[in-house]
Amino acid sequence: MPKALSEPSLAGIPFDLGTAAVFAIIGWVCFRMGFRAQLAARRDHFEVVNLLTVERIPYHDVADVHIDQLSVRITLTSGRRVRAWGLADSLLNTGGSERQNLADRLRLIAAERQTGAAPRRTRSRLPDRWAPVALFALFSGAIVLRLVTQ
């Protein structure tokens, strides 16, 4: 692929820009899943960072925590469920009693840290909006450099 990308394009500029956009989106997805996806226990809330959303769940809104095969499912007092995907390797290697211990620890954190002054639950869609633009600029710049130098 690098050899093919270093050669002049036969399809023209629109194809090159489309290719840059596709690589930017793939790079953004890899960045989100590889480096940003997480479940963090903050001072007054759980922060669930998934591919397209960031949710901040106050501990007093947590009704239950359950560990599925590849995710943690937080059930809220309203009945809504929030899944934390793409968790660290430690969860993927957790099985049997260790899996239950992890769920118990998360429930204990939620029970111990419940306060009346907790922030309200928030949900942000499409975080890191700058990443696709930056990656698109990077790949477009590489294509322009290739076109100028050849």
Image (spheres, helix red, strand yellow):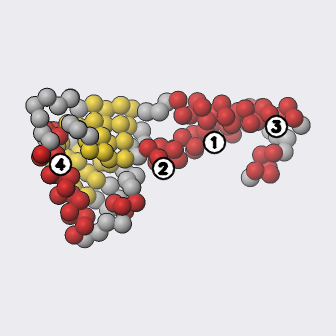
Q: Tell me the crowding category of disc 2: few under 14, some 14 to 19, or many 20 or more residues within 10 angstroms, Cα based.
A: some
Where, by quadrant of the figure, is residue 9 drawn?
Answer: top right
Q: Label 3 sits on what residue type?
A: Arg
Residue 114 in percent (x, y) is at 12, 39
Alpha-carbon neighbours of circle 1 within 10 Å: few (<14), some, or many (≥20)?
Answer: some
Farthest front residue? Answer: 43
In terms of secondary structure, where does tag 1 sit? helix
**Label 3 vs label 1: CA separation?**
16 Å
* Residue at image point 31% right, 45% down: 40
Task: Compare marks 3 and 1 and give the one earlier in the sequence.
Answer: 1
Residue 135 falls in image quadrant: top right
Camera-side residue of 40 and 87: 40
For image coordinates 41% across by 46% down, the residue present is 37
Residue 53 picture location, percent across and down: 38, 37
Q: Which mark is residue 109?
A: 4
Q: Earlier in the sequence, mark 4 or mark 3?
A: 4
Q: Nearer the viewer, residue 112 or 62?
A: 112
What amino acid type is highlighted by mark number 4?
A: Ile
Q: CA distance from mark 2 to mark 3?
A: 29 Å
The residue that label 1 is drawn on is: 23
